[in-house]
Image: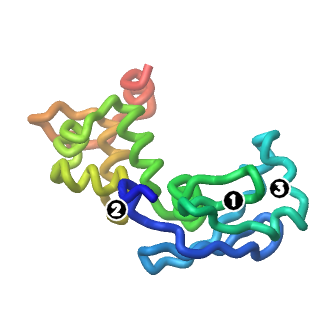
Amino acid sequence: MSNFFFPQLLTVEALKPYRLSTTWSTGETLEVDLGDILRKNLALHPILEPEVFARVHLDGWGSIEWFDSELGADNVYAWCKEQAGKVSHEMFGNWMHRNDLSLTSAAQALGISRRMVSYYRTAQKQIPRQTWLACLGWEATRPKPTELPLSLPTAKQYAALHA
C-alpha cells in the first residue's frame, strides 16, 4: 500500500443501497452515497444490484472492491469530504490545475508554505475553510504577486478575467 496518500481506509460497510460507512486512519468515520457515481459509469452498473452492493469489502491495497470493480481510497475520501460539506484534496488539486499553479506558485498565492500546499494536495492535512475561501478569492481576483486587491471584481470584471 502506498504511503503517498495519507488517510488509509480501515473499514467499509454497506449501510443501504448505495451508501457506505468508511473508517479512516485519521480517526474519521465518514459516510458516502455512491448512487450517482455508480449510475454514471456503465461498467459499475452491476454494483447497483442491492445484493452485489452489500458485498462491498476492502481489497489488499486499501481500495473498496466488489468482485472485479474497485474504487480507489483517495477518490472515496474526497467524495466523503465533499458530501459532508468539507473541502477535499481533489478540490484543492483541481483549483491548482485550473489556475496552472505549481506547489511553489500556489504557496505564494495563498501566503503559506510549499510543504503545506503539498499536505493539502495529498490529503495529509485537512484544508481549513479559510484556506479554501482564499483559493476562491485568489481565483476571482488573480492578484499580482506584489499587490493585494482591495475588493472583489464585478461580474463583468470577473468574466473578463476568465475569458
Residue 65 tag number: 1
Whole-number angstrom distance, CA of label 2 to CA of label 3: 30 Å
Residue 119 tag number: none
Asked if 133 appears above or below 20 in the picture, the reply is: above
| Residue count near mark 3 (Cα–Cα under 10 Å), binned few <14, some 14–19, many ≥20 | many
The answer to whether residue 34 of the structure is visible from this angle is yes
Whole-number angstrom distance, CA of label 1 to CA of label 3: 10 Å
Closer to the camera in the image, 5 or 125: 5
Most extreme residue toward the left, as rendered? 146
Asked if 147 appears above or below 38 in the picture, the reply is: above
Residue 124 tag number: 2
Q: Are marks 1 and 3 in contact (CB under 8 Å)?
A: no
Asked if 96 appears above or below 47 in the picture, the reply is: above
Q: Amino acid at mark 3?
A: Ile
Whole-number angstrom distance, CA of label 2 to CA of label 1: 23 Å
Q: Position of residue 114 (x, y in %)?
A: 18, 48
Q: Residue at x 41, y 56 (%)?
A: 2
Relative to residue 70, is residue 15 drawn left or right?
right
Among the 4 quarters of the image, the one containing residue 19: bottom right
| Residue count near mark 2 (Cα–Cα under 10 Å), binned few <14, some 14–19, many ≥20 | some
